[in-house]
Image (cartoon, rainbow, N blue to C red):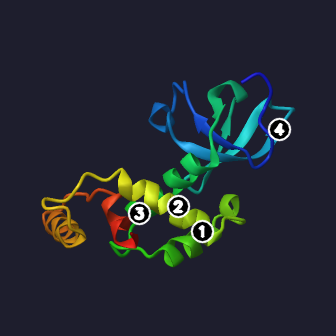
Amino acid sequence: MESPPAKGAAVVLHSLVGRAELNGKHGVVKMFDASRGRVAVTVEGKGLSVRPENLALADREASLVAALQALCVAPGPGWHSAKELHSRLLQQSEWAGVSLQEVKRGCTVLAQSAPPAANGTVADAAASETEAAEAGAAADPAARVATLL
């Protein structure tokens, strides 16, 4: 990226060496610090300072789906309603203007990316998640929003 993206732009981090685990993560631009040549970006609720060349523009829907996925793996109840996720997103400054309709679309995309349950029912997905949680395994975040559909 030749010039820094505008404030509020949805971005994807890439080519990071020191924090390679952040490559592919979605974020939102907060500001450009010209004196340091760095872009302030919020990723999963945390502020980062990144060189502009380590950012690529992302579409808003992809960034929203990534934010929803992060919320779904956060500690708390296993199943989330669209209204609850919307409320939680509004608490993050980078998503202050997101609409409930956008959240519902993002949940649909996330749920469609989930592997199908054994017989394709949401009840089986819930049972699988309960079994995984009891076994101490992490459940698929996409399955956690499957009940919204």
Residue at the right extreme of this rendering: 35
- The reply to whether discs 1 and 4 touch (Cβ–Cβ < 8 Å) is no
SS under mark 4:
strand
First in residue order: circle 4 vs circle 2: 4
Q: Nearer the viewer, mark 4 or mark 2?
A: 2
**Label 2 environment density (alpha carbons within 10 Å; few <14, some 14–19, many ≥20):** some
Q: Nearer the viewer, mark 1 or mark 4?
A: 1
In percent of the image, x 69 and y 29: which residue is there? Answer: 51
Of 143 and 55, nearer the camera is 143
Q: Is residue 91 above or below residue 116?
A: below
First in residue order: circle 1 vs circle 3: 3
Q: Nearer the viewer, mark 1 or mark 3?
A: 1
Q: Which residue is mark 2?
A: 105
> x, y (%) of residue 68?
49, 59
How far apart marks 1 and 3 lie (CA) works out to: 18 Å
In percent of the image, x 55 and y 46: which residue is there? Answer: 62
> x, y (%) of residue 61?
58, 50
Q: Which residue is mark 4?
A: 33
Say which quarter of the image contains residue 11.
Answer: top right
SS under mark 1:
helix
> x, y (%) of residue 2?
77, 21
- The reply to whether discs 2 and 1 touch (Cβ–Cβ < 8 Å) is yes
Q: Which residue is mark 3?
A: 72
Q: Nearer the viewer, mark 3 or mark 2?
A: 2
Q: Amino acid at mark 1?
A: Gln
SS under mark 3:
helix
Q: Amino acid at mark 2?
A: Arg
First in residue order: circle 1 vs circle 4: 4
In percent of the image, x 54 and y 27: which residue is there? Answer: 16
Query: Seen in the image, is 2 located left or right of residue 143?
Result: right
Residue at the top extreme of this rendering: 2
Q: Which residue is mark 1?
A: 101
